[in-house]
Each structure stands twice: as C-alpha cells, then as structure tokens.
Image (tube, coloured by chain):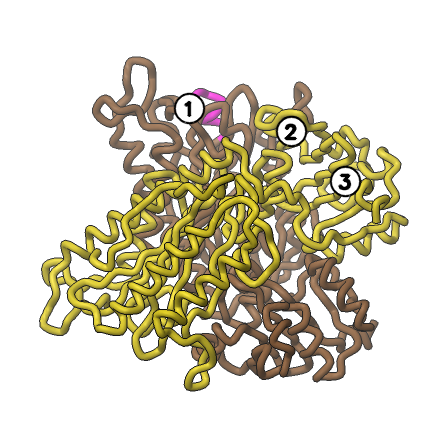
Chain colours: A brown, B yellow
Amino acid sequence: MKKLLTDPILLVASPSANPDVRYITGFSAPDPVVVLCSGKNIHLVVSALEYSRAVRETSGLKIHTPESLRLDPAKKRDVVAWAIALLKSNRHRRVRVPWDFSAGIASKLQKENIRCEVIEGPVFPQRAVKTAKEIECLREAQRAAVRAMSAACRRIRNASVNSRGLLCEGRKVITSEDLQRFIDKVLLEDNCATESTIASCGKQSADPHGHGIGPLRANEPIVIDIYPKHKGHGYFGDLTRTVVKGKPSAKVAAMHRAVKSAQADALNRVRAGVRASDIHAAVHKTFARHGFQTGILDGFPQGFIHGTGHGVGLAIHEAPSVSTAENILKAGNVITIEPGLYYRDAGGVRIEDTVVVTRTGYEYLCPLRKTIEP
Amino acid sequence: MKKLLTDPILLVASPSANPDVRYITGFSAPDPVVVLCSGKNIHLVVSALEYSRAVRETSGLKIHTPESLRLDPAKKRDVVAWAIALLKSNRHRRVRVPWDFSAGIASKLQKENIRCEVIEGPVFPQRAVKTAKEIECLREAQRAAVRAMSAACRRIRNASVNSRGLLCEGRKVITSEDLQRFIDKVLLEDNCATESTIASCGKQSADPHGHGIGPLRANEPIVIDIYPKHKGHGYFGDLTRTVVKGKPSAKVAAMHRAVKSAQADALNRVRAGVRASDIHAAVHKTFARHGFQTGILDGFPQGFIHGTGHGVGLAIHEAPSVSTAENILKAGNVITIEPGLYYRDAGGVRIEDTVVVTRTGYEYLCPLRKTIEP
C-alpha cells in the first residue's frame, strides 16, 4: 500500500465540471484536460487554444499541449492520447485514478500497459480543509444566498393573501416558480448561479428534494433552499429557511421549534476533533425529545430522513459528511448543519446554515435570523 | 460482437448531470440512480425518498428501491450495492457500460464476477435523432437565446459612446460582465439558465473560449454566445452573433462578410444523407476564397480554429459532430452551424445558429438576423 501512495494521480476531465481538477490546477474550462500529479509536480495538458489562458490563470504548473508533447496531428483532439504521451514521457506505468475516472479511458490505458488503481474516497483529502482564501470565496457565495433569502422573505412578508388563501401581489398569485426565478435573479446580481432553487410549499415540502410547483399558500410551511455557485471562482454557498405567511398549524410550529433546537444542539457540538456522527446522533436525540418520530410511517420514510450536513466547497456536497459516516471534524472544514423534519400530513421544515469549523467551535459564513415569520 | 450488443446496458449516475440517464428514464434528480436497460425493460433504482416522484414523473419503467431489492439497511445508500442487487436478481453476469462509467464501480462489479464492456461512442445513438417533442423543447431553449440576444443587441444599440470609446449608459460604462449578467437574467424569464455566457470584445474575442472581461468598446467586434439550458426539461439552445457598435475596421468587416457567407454555404449543404465533414470542408473553402488563412500564425492557432458545429440536445455538445469526423446527417438531427474567424490583431467573429436537419434541407429552431450592426 505504501508504494501505491507514491504512484502519480491521473485526472482526465473538464475543469468546470470536475472539482478535483479545478482545485488542483486553479484552471477552469469546459473542455477536458489531463492532469498528472507526480511528486511535487503538477502537469496540465490543454489544447493549443487554451494554452495562453492556462499560463495566465494558473501558477506553479507544468503546462503542455498536444503539440509540445509531439503528438501526431491526427491525435491532437484525443485526450487519451494526451494522457498516454504524458505518462510515457514521464515513464509512469502505474497511476492512481479517482473513483469516477472514465472506465473507457482506464481500459485504453490498460492496453498501453499502464495500470490504473482506483482511489477509494477523496482524491485530494486536503480539499476538505479550506484555506483562508477559499473561506472568503465560500463566504462570498453564502452572502449571495443570504441576500437572496432575505429578498425572498421580504417578498413573502409583503404579499397579500386572497380569498382562497393564496399569496398574491395585487391580483397576481405568487407561485413556487415565481419565487425560484426571483431568487435566481437576485443571485445573478452577486455573480452567482444555481442549477435549481427549492421553494416548496405545504405538503409538497414533505419531499426534501421536491423543488415546488404552483401557488404559495398562507398558513403552510414554505421551505426555501438556496445553493448558489459563484460564476467566477466556482465555490458554493448553501442556506435553507422555512417560513409561514400567516399562522402555522400547531404541528408545523412545533416542528419549527424542534428543528431550530436541533440545529442549535448540533452547532453547539461543532468544533475540531469532534466525531461528525455524534453531531448527527444528537439531532436524532433532540427530535425524539421533542416527540418527533423517524422511520417508515404509513409506508413512507418520514421524520428526520436525511443527514445532518455535508462539506461545501467547489462541490455542493463534499467531505466531510455529517451523518452516520465516521469523520472527525477538522479546523477549516466548511460544513452545513441542516436538520429537518418531514411529515406527509404537514409538510417539511428545514433550517440550514453553512459554518466554518474552528479549534473551539464554529463561525457562520454569513448569519441570518431563523424565525418562522418571513 | 453480435452477442455483446444484446448484453444489458448499466448506468450509475445523477440524472441531472448525466444526459443519457435523463434521456432514457425521463427522470431528473441530483442524487445518483441506477439504470439497467435489458431488452425492452428499463429498470430504475432510486432511494425511497425519490420513489413517489419517480413513479409520478416517468412512465414505462420498472422502478425499484433499495428496500424493494431487499438490501441490507446498511447498504441502502450504496448505489453500487443497488446495481449488484439488480443485476443479480436479473441473473446478468455481463453488462455494457458507457465510456464515462465510473472505474471504481467497474472494479467493484468485477469483484462480484460481473464483467463490464465499455461502449465506444454514444450509449443511445438514437439520442442524435430528435423526436417532435424533443424539437419543441430545443426550440423553447433556442427562443430564450434569441430573446436574450435581441435584448443584448438592443442594449448595445441604445448605448452611447464616451470620449474614451467605451460603451455607456448615462455615465456608467457597460462591461462584458454587465452584459453577461443582463443576458442571464433575460434567460431566467424564460426559465433557462446557463453555466456561462460569452460577451467578449475586441482582441479578447480572438479566444473562442474566453468569456470576456472589462469595458465594451465601440468600433470593435463583440462576440455574444448564449447557450441556455431549460430548467424544466433540460434541453439546450445555442446561438452566437458578432456585432460592432460604430464602425468596424476593414478587416473585421471583411471577416464578418466571410463568416456570414461561410455559414450560408454550410447551411446550403445541410440535409439528411450528407457527410458532415463535407460541410466542414466547405467552410474551410469559403474562408480560403475570402482570403482568410488558418494555421499556426506567429506561433498561435489563428483563422478558423474549431469545428463547424455539433449536435445539441440534453447536452450542449453531443452527436453528431460537424467537423472532420465521419458522420452522415440524419433527418431529426439538431445541430449548430457556427463558422468563425479568429485573429490576434483583430479579434473574433462567429455566427452560430441551431437548426433541425430535414430530408430536403434544414429548419431554424428560431431565426434571427445576422447583421454586424447590433
């Protein structure tokens, strides 16, 4: 095993789609590149088209092109040929590759007598511990999420309620889709974008992954989950609040109190050296103490049906996971703490913040109040 | 080989990130799922959390959960265990997998004596031929691109020019970033989003992949490339125009005429049965006729330095490629035709439309004028 760990790491992927490539090179581009981490050297192969930009936007890398690797012009668009040429010129016969490395490329390399060993777990475990510079990027994305959440809550607060109990502006009913679009526009002001925003109302919100469709209703929970990616540096933010316009049912009000209290209990345990699974277990305990059951109820998973949190960085979900997995938190981890309760008769309540783990506790990337009133 | 083609196809990926999974299941979700296409049966394994939505939003699939596959609760979040259980219950010992299938999962399957054969080329070649319904989705995304392009051109047209030659609104200089953000907001109105929009001015636009930064200038080319993804159905549009506010240099004006003429020549050749590489060769010929050279000039690739086009669908770049590759166009292909010229002393000019290939020619998804005036 010790020998294996010294084998170089090979990545073949689009930097804008692959956080490991982006992390280790600092380069972003939609087209695939080849990266080889060998000892202290990081090699990057890009097309001639990208060469000047790669030189300009990165530092400390050894940058190659198909031409500098003296590839046959017929192979100059074939990234597998780039990888083979680079490996051969460095006399590597074994490489370690990520879990999600292309099986097709691995089999091509095998035909060239280059052996791929799959890395189980993170390729660059150091990605989980953020530098001060990375934390500033994450904070920028989280600030955008807070700004968008505040704007969305303001819109709900200022809405009127029509005779059918629907949220309105003038005569126009506000839908989940309206609110999602509105949030996405506010995010753009801060140069952030998102694949999809959750703005889910009433019983719909009992599905933590449903995005929400149709009119927003008074007296029912509205779960808003915003996870922007900064278009410049690519780091994410992640933030959820649950609000009710009007008067929540007794059950939803109790769920909100329990979730808030579970989040506080979880946050109180966050600090370097703590087992993430203990934090997750504490959330389960708080919910039990508040009388909320978790399990298969009426044939559906209900209650607290997801993990307590996850790392956030160049990927929206990355190490360390805060769930049943065995992870020890480290100073510099950036994680979400997002307990939630989901019942098909009442809907969902989730409260999520993204925090930096410190030696003695945690720090919000960007705090925001947690009231059920919008 | 014939025998292999009857082996089932296995996919393990997130539907929202993997166009093949989304195509064959009609399901979208951020978390990974398992898909097995075996004869006429399409199996989908999702978590219990996603089960109701999968049933509601798809048709004709056999839908499973870790629970219905009787998996050990400890493995209920392990998608590899889902795949193994599904394959074993169907007595499959060999599967075909996509080129980009996870090498890690392939090696786990091998340990269970399940052999993976990598499919070279498209997993579902039928994806390249769009149905009428798919064409309507693509048209919807392309309409959004046209609307955003028109709005961006209007903004450039209405801009004033300050004493330093910069485009202004009142006293405020308009930057590439302003225009990108503006375009992205207009796209959101049509429920479309984009990873990044190109709005690149002057010499910057000589890099076809540069997104553009800083002030927009009069009398210089502004390349605007918009490729929205519809947030609902996930299909893309793709559109590029190059405009000059004020008076273009003689070289840029000539480049624009050549590109327009090359695009017309290429479009005139588009129809079912034609070799895509002949269309690409025709573009090269038109540029040569107009006196524009392609090759390594002053040490940099300049001239017509990319392909003529690509298929568009659930991926922004998919089959068929319109370049040197050997592809015969088919009725129902949706492709871009996007010749361009790039010179470091002048900048870039590209004109791109997305069209449906028909038996006798082509149809614009959504036409838009191609003038150099914004």
- Residue on which disc 3 sits: B82
Indicate which disc residue B51 carries: 2
- Would residue A322 appear left or right of B93 to someone viewing this image? left
Q: Number of numbered discs present?
A: 3
Q: Position of residue A221 (x, y in %)?
A: 43, 28
Looking at the rendered structure, the secondary structure element under dot 3 is helix
Q: In the shown orientation, is residue B326 left or right of residue A242? A: right
Image coordinates of residue A126 in percent, x first then y, are: 61, 68
User: Of all residues shown, which one is farthest toward the bottom?
Assistant: B298
Identified by mark 2, the residue type is Tyr
Q: Is residue A95 left or right of residue B335?
A: right
Label 3 or label 2, whichever comes before in sequence order: 2
Q: Dividing the picture into quarters, in which one does residue A94 lie?
A: bottom right
In three-dimensional space, the C-alpha distance between marks 3 and 2, rounded to whole angstroms, equals 14 Å
Q: Nearer the viewer, residue A256 or B247?
A: B247
Q: Position of residue A177 (x, y in %)?
A: 39, 33
> At 38% across and 57% down in the image, what residue appears?
B263
- What secondary structure predominates along the stretch shown in magenta? helix
Boundaries of the magenta span: A248-255
Say which of marks 1 and 2 sits in front.
Answer: 2
Is residue A356 one of those drawn in magenta?
A: no
Residue at x 52% of width, y 56% of height: B322
The amino acid type found where label 3 is placed reads Trp
Residue type (three-letter) at the residue carrying disc 1 = Glu
